Amino acid sequence: MKLGMGLVGPGFIAAHHLDAVRRLGTVEVVGIAGSSLESAKKRARELNAGHAYADYHELLADPAIDVVHNTTPNHLHREVSLAALRAGKHVISDKPLAATMEEARELYEAACEGNLAHVVTFNYRGYPLVQQARAMIAKGKIGPSVFVHGCYLQDWLTDERAYTWRLDPKLAGASSALGDIGSHWCDLAEHVTGARITAVLADLHTVVPVREVPASSAKAFSGASKQPAKRRKITSEDVATVLLRFDNGARGCVTVGQVLPGHKNDLRLEVNGREASLAWRQEQPNELWIGHHAKPNTVLTRDPAQLDPSARGYAHLPAGHPEAWADAFRNIVADAYAWIRRGAKPETKPDALPTFADGYRNSLVVDAMLKSHAAGGRWHAVDDLLESTRTTRKRG
């Protein structure tokens, strides 16, 4: 029997959620809700997305919907996801889990209350070679990890005439570059290494402190608008560098930026172990670099026959047939629906699937980075509130 899916917030990422569930073949797209009935009708026609609801409350009241995809702007994540959970719906939310650490904790606790799936789309976990790297590290193929580093670099906000709601703290939260893309890198680093970031030292900077804001702001990644504009002061960072310490003793660093010409979606992760190194780049996702000290370096290309069994299921085409971003996104969504069909119990969750626990954990890391910078660039511990919450719930 097909599961019914409803989507709230039909913006940029909505089409990719719809594409992913359609590729599964086991999910029915029931309908979508937007900021108004008129906008929902328009997007439903454009995306062939079924029924248009007047608002998300009407969507949640429909018994045909089993799973809610929350693709709203950040400031609405808590409101929509919490309402969906209370309505007994499984939830797949875009990251960040919520606009603040406190809201993320509330959602995590609410998700723990019922037997419902709760997923955050840290979709870079869905690449086959990311899972290959994770398996190799877990099996000791590179020895103990000693250094974890990389970057997530973009240029879509380079022009001072480019503006998006993601730069408005009231809509996106206090952080821009770290919250939007640095969060992806941190989740990927922790997932691949199996280690946790315990302390950070952050240096944040706003390269473009004033932007021209048109009457109708530019959509994400659409570039500068040509409409008449007013000038607005920007308070969130567009460049950041962060030193990292991990619970396994490894050190690391990450650089993020959204005003760096020539970098489109340049996410890179490298893990250096005592015996070998691994490096993966999102813009060349079908290659995993393996570095050695006393023998030649090698490159593992995506080939299902050569992958670890745990990674093989994330590759769907034979060797030589590239797979990329949409395929990784589909893999995460597939894991989410597989979990739902297994009863959404903790023991049946696919290992690669990011949940609200990961979303909350990620918010703690970003919050520590903001506090480190605010303190003048001092080391700041990442609060282990997730573990304390789990312990309290077990005692209760």
Image: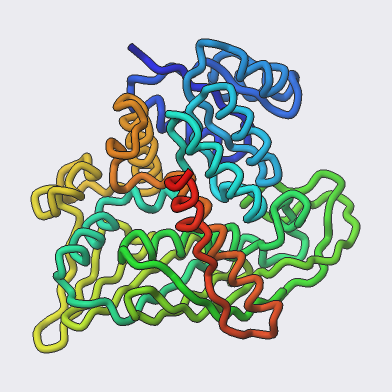
User: Residue at 58% across / 22% down in the picture?
Assistant: 87
Tell me if residue 229 comes above or below residue 88 in the rendering.
below
Q: Residue furthest bottom?
A: 294
Tell me if residue 277 comes above or below residue 59 in the rendering.
below
Tell me if residue 93 comes above or below residue 258 in the rendering.
above
Tell whether 27 sits left or right of 239: left
User: Residue at 44% across / 70% down in the picture?
Assistant: 197
Seen from the viewer's position, the closer of residues 393 and 312 is 393
Tell whether 202 sits left or right of 304: right
The type of colouring in the image is: rainbow
Percent across and percent down for residue 113 are 50, 34
Tell whether 59 sits left or right of 122: right
User: Residue at 35% across / 59% down in the picture?
Assistant: 191
Q: Residue furthest front?
A: 395
Q: How many marks?
A: 0
- Is residue 88 among the parts visible in the rendering? yes
Percent across and percent down for residue 166 are 69, 54
User: Residue at 66% across / 46% down in the picture?
Assistant: 74
Quadrant into which the N terminus falls: top left
- Is residue 121 among the parts visible in the rendering? no
Percent across and percent down for residue 24 are 33, 26
